[in-house]
Image: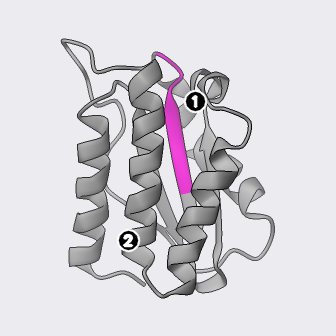
Amino acid sequence: MLHKEELNQISESIRSAESHTSGEIRVCVARHCKGDPLDAALRKFLQLKMDTTQLRNGVLIYVSPTDQKAAIVGDEGINDAARDDFWEDALAEMLSFFRKGLIVEGISKGVGKVGELIRVQFPAMENNINELGDEVILEE
């Protein structure tokens, strides 16, 4: 899957994106995704309790680079802020990187796009608390 340096690079992109927002971004990298990636992402979103943030502004980026599948799930606060085609555009851009073998770059680009969206709706607050970890979740 991904090496430690690559995981650290993705975590750093999460920290960077979150430094401008009270929103919470998590990334889950799955070895394989046998079914619909959106279903898998929704299950993981709930399993990680991402729907419990104070402002309901969590976003999960779920990717299976091997299968070239990905999905993004945003909590209700984020979904209200996103234009209709935002998630599809972000996914298309990430998958274009995956097809070139640029997995870390694709994930980092997706994190950055999500960070731009949530920064507008959920700017960083004075006493900003990181409610969810920034480490990449690996799923076998």
Measuring from the top left, give residue 69's x and y in whole percent: 67, 72
Could you classify mark 2 by the number of other residues whose Cα lies within 10 Å: few (under 14), some (14-19), or many (20 or more)?
Answer: some
Whether 53 is drawn above or below 31: the answer is above
Instruction: State the residue in front, 121 or 53.
Output: 121
Give the mark nearer the N terminus: 1 vs 2. Answer: 1
Image quadrant assignment for residue 19: top left
Could you classify mark 1 by the number of other residues whose Cα lies within 10 Å: few (under 14), some (14-19), or many (20 or more)?
Answer: some
Residue found at x 74% / y 36%: 84
Q: Quadrant of the N terminus?
A: bottom left
Q: How many marks?
A: 2
Residue 64 in view in this figure = no
Label number found at residue 51: 1
Measuring from the top left, give residue 58's x and y in whole percent: 50, 33
Say left or right for 48 vs 136: right
Residue found at x 65% / y 24%: 76
Instruction: State the residue in front, 48 or 14.
Output: 14
Image quadrant assignment for residue 38: bottom right
Q: Secondary structure at mark 1?
A: helix
Please state the extent of the stretch shown in magenta in the rendering. 55-61
Cα–Cα gap, marks 1 and 2: 27 Å
Label number found at residue 18: none
Whether 61 is drawn above or below 124: the answer is below
Q: Disc 1 residue type? A: Asp
Residue found at x 50% / y 26%: 57
Measuring from the top left, give residue 110's x and y in whole percent: 47, 56
Q: Disc 2 residue type? A: Glu
Q: Quadrant of the C terminus?
A: bottom right
Image quadrant assignment for residue 3: bottom left
Reading the image, the residue beneath label 2 is 105
